[in-house]
Image: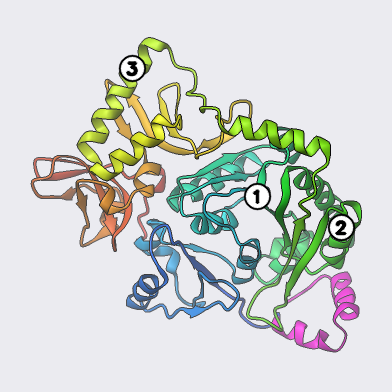
Amino acid sequence: MDLPQDFIERIKIQLGESYHDFLAEYEKERTYGLRCNPLKTDMEQLRSVLLENRIVPEKVPWADEGFYYPADTHPGKLPFHEAGAYYIQEPSAMIAVQLLEPKPGEKILDLCAAPGGKSTQIAGRMQGEGVLVANEVIAQRAKILSRNIERMGVRNAIVCNETPQRLAQRFPLYFDRIVVDAPCSGEGMFRKDIQSREEWSKEQVEVCAARQRDILEQAAAMLKPGGILVYSTCTFAPQENEQNAEWFVQRYPQFKLEKSERLWPHLHRAEGHYAARFRKKPIYEKNEKEQEARLSRQDKRPASAGKVRKEKKHVFYDLFAEFCTATLSQESQSCLREKIEAGQLAVFGEQFYLLPDGIDSPDGLKTERAGLHLGCCKKNRFEPSHALAMALRPSDVKQILEPEEPERYIRGEALCCGAQKGWTLVTVHGCSLGWGKASQGILKNHYPKGLRRSYL
C-alpha cells in the first residue's frame, strides 16, 4: 500500500522500533466489525443469527456490544441488519462510547455524530430513557445520521444540523455526558479509504487540530459540572490527540483527564483510534449556578406542541387516538398516554412527534428529527411512520406477521396473511422491520420505497 511519505517519516519517529510492525499491517486485510443493538436484540441471538448465515463472529475485547466478522462475508445484506439489530462499525471506533459510559435517564450530546455509529451505541446504553442530542453540521450527513437513528429504533433522540456554536448558545451547562468524535486527518482510515490517503498532508493535520480545539471549546460550555466529556479521533497524529488533550486541560483547568486509550493496527485488531475521557470538576461559579437553576426550570416546562390551528388539533388527536386503540397493546397505549399528558407529544403541521422526556421542543434549531416521528394525518386518517415501526417491539402491538421470506417484504412485495385486518407489524427474528396493512388475506407493503432492496 502506498502511504504518504511525510506520514511514513513521522510515524517512524513516533513509533521507533515498532515502526516496521506498523507498516507490515498495511499489507494485510483490514478489520471488519459490527455492533449489537440492545434496543432490538441481544448478543446471544445476534450470534445465533450470524452463525445461521455462515458468519462466524468473534468478540471485540474493548466493546461490550462488538463483534468482528470475516472479510469474505456480508452481514450488511441480511434482513436482520435492515431490522436494525446491529450496526456495521469499525471495531476501534467502538471504544469512545465504552469510555463515555452512558446511562439511562441522562442528557447526552454526540456533537459530531454522522453517520451515527456512536449515537446509536449511546442510544443502546440509554434504553430509551433520557435525552440524546445527535448533531451533524453537514446537511447531507445529518440526513444519513437521521436514517441510522431511525433504523436502529431509537426513541429518545433529537437529530440536529447545527454548528457547535449554535448548540452551545441553546444548551449551556445542559448535558451530563458529551462525546466529541472530531473531524480529523483520518490516518486510521488509510487501509479502508484511498481518498483519505490522497487527501492527507502535514498541513491538513494542523488544520484539523485547530478545528478540533474550536469544537472542544463549545463542548466545554455545554457540559454540566461533574459531567463527562470524551474526545476521540480516528487518527494517529499527536497534534490531534495527546497535544489537544494537554491543551484542553491547560485552557480549562476545571477539567481533569481521567483516562486515554490508543488503538494501533499492529498492537490491536483494529484500524486505529484515540479516545480521552475528561471529567468536569463539580465546582460552581456564580454564573454556573444561575444558569443551571434557569435550565432546571426550563426542563420542567411542558414541551411546545408545535404550530397547529386549534380547530385542527382536536381532529388530529382523535385520528391518532383511533390508530393507537386499533393497533397498539394496552400497555403501549397506557405508556403513550402518560407521555402525552407529560407534554411530550408535538405536532408540526400534520406530523406527530414524541419528544424525549425532559427537553423542550427544538424550535429555532435546524432539526432533522425532533424526537420519535410517530406519523402523520392525511385524508382523514392517521398513517404511522416507519420510525414508529422500527421503535416498536412485537409485544407493543396487537398484530404481527413474521414472513418466511422477509426478503420479499424488503423488496416491496405484498404478502399473504391470515384473518388480520389493519396495521400489522412485520418482523424478522422477532425484530420490527416495518408496517403492512392487512385486508382480505393480503398484507399491503408499507416498507419505504427509498429503503427497498432487490439484492436481498
Horizontal and vertical percent for residue 111? 68, 47
Secondary element under disc 3, as helix, strand or loop, is helix
Horizontal and vertical percent for residue 301? 55, 28
Question: In the image shown, does 116 or 452 lie closer to the viewer?
Answer: 116
Q: Amino acid at mark 1?
A: Asp
Q: Quadrant of the C terminus?
A: bottom left
Horizontal and vertical percent for residue 273? 71, 69
Q: Which residue is mark 3?
A: 314
Q: Is residue 180 above or below residue 328?
A: below
Q: Which residue is mark 2?
A: 249
Q: Earlier in the sequence, mark 2 or mark 1?
A: 1
Secondary element under disc 2, as helix, strand or loop, is helix
Q: Residue at x 78, y 43 (%)?
A: 221
Q: Residue at x 60, y 42 (%)?
A: 140
Q: Residue at x 63, y 38 (%)?
A: 161
Q: Which residue is mark 1?
A: 176
